[in-house]
Amino acid sequence: MKKEEQKVIMTNLGLPMLAEKTQFTDELFNLDNNFDMNGSPMNRAAYNLMVSKRDISLYVLHNMKPHRNWYVTDIKKYFGIKGNGQKLLDRFLALVSEYEELMKVSAEIDNDPHE
């Protein structure tokens, strides 16, 4: 998906964080970016989002690094978010919320009987 198309579509859906061009959104909208997860295809960006939600929560709420090679800077760059501590977690959870809304809208479109 081109940057301009992505921005227009996501803005019209009311998803401003997904309208931004980041490595996460590039991978999310890349249809060839799937891998096999327990016998089902899984988008690599969606997987990274789920794992990062756990990791950021551990880091912010419990002051724990998930593993010794984990750096919060990598998460900030990948998802295109800024902030420290609770602000970082809040922005990340807003991104997760936008992703969930996108999946909900996508499911509704897939189940539309008027197509």
Image (cartoon, rainbow, N blue to C red):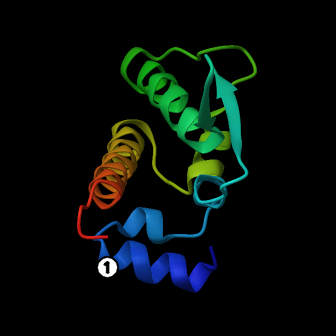
Which residue does the image show at 46% across and 17% down from the upper left?
63
Which residue does the image show at 61% across and 79% down from the upper left?
3
Say above or below: 99 vs 41: below
**Quadrant (top left, top right, bottom left, bottom right) of the N terminus:** bottom right
Left or right, 32 with respect to 1, comes to right
7 and 88: which is toward the camera = 7
In the picture, residue 70 is in which quadrant? top right
Dot 1 crowding, Cα within 10 Å, few <14, some 14–19, many 20+: few
Left or right, 113 with respect to 72, comes to left
Number of labelled discs?
A: 1
7 and 29: which is toward the camera = 29
Q: Would you name the residue on which mark 1 appears?
A: 12
* Residue 113 horizontal/vertical position (percent): 24, 62
Q: Amino acid at mark 1?
A: Asn
44 and 81: which is toward the camera = 44
Which residue does the image show at 52% across and 14% down from the upper left?
64
In the picture, residue 62 is in which quadrant? top left
* Residue 109 horizontal/vertical position (percent): 31, 61
Left or right, 30 with respect to 54, comes to right
Which residue does the image show at 34% across and 66% down from the upper left?
15
**Quadrant (top left, top right, bottom left, bottom right) of the C terminus:** bottom left
Secondary structure, mark 1, is helix
* Residue 91 horizontal/vertical position (percent): 37, 49
